[in-house]
Amino acid sequence: MVIDTSAINRRNHALADDDEVWLFGYGSLIFKADFPYLERRGAHIQGWARRFWQGSHDHRGTPESPGRVVTLTAAPGQHCHGVAYRIRGAVFAHLDHREKNGYLRLDTTLHLTGGETVAGLLYVATADNPAFLGPAPAADIARQIAAAHGPSGANLDYLLDLAAALRALGTRDTHIEQLLAELSAGV
Ligand code: BEZ
């Protein structure tokens, strides 16, 4: 099921084109920065964990064979590592369209590598959106990812690109490493 959240995002977080906003990226925004930015920094957020729990019917899968992409789930005491982009408000028109399948902008606090803390936004797909798939055994998630393909490419490439990008940032994600281990074991 595809639900277009771009109008909700425009309404809930009205931004002027030349506003400067920090955006936290924890998924494809890390390895696919197809938008202009003023600055890119390593960063983490607190109290959240990255999970392959959101269905992708429009990018890495199809309505008949959805893929899985990442969203965030509340995880008290945990950190989620990613990147922070300082961008202009005008860039959100592109991002809202790109991430329109169930993702809503949410206010957050970003901890930039080096110690600075800034206010910003992230995109999250919550459990109440129609494309949400939720938790499943790691082997099942890995199998679904291995099988799915969509207009943006193979779901497996999304997982591998994200894993490589996180390693390049000097961090690892246990959920992602678990999925890679399942794939290596030949799910
Ligand atoms: C991200 O990389 O932060 C992101 C992932 C999925 C949807 C929107 C943003």
Image (spheres, rainbow, N blue to C red):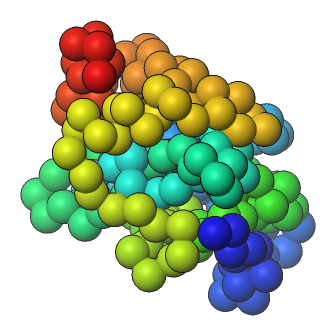
Residue at point 71%, 84% (across, down) = 8
Residue 87 visible? The answer is: yes
Q: Position of residue 109 (x, y in %)?
A: 40, 63
For this orientation, the residue located farthest to the bottom is 11
Q: Position of residue 55 (x, y in %)?
A: 52, 56
Q: Position of residue 134 (x, y in %)?
A: 34, 62
Residues 104 and 147: in front is 147
Residues 14 and 141: in front is 141
Q: Quadrant of the N terminus?
A: bottom right
Residue at point 41%, 62% (across, down) = 133
Residue 115 visible? The answer is: no
Whether 84 is drawn above or below 168: the answer is: below
For this orientation, the residue located farthest to the front is 64
Whether 93 is drawn above or below 67: the answer is: below
Residue at point 25%, 52% (across, down) = 136
Q: Quadrant of the C terminus?
A: top left
Q: To which quarter of the image does residue 167 belong? A: top left
Whether 121 is drawn above or below 60: the answer is: below
Whether 182 is drawn above or below 56: the answer is: above
| Left or right: 35, with 32 as reference point | right
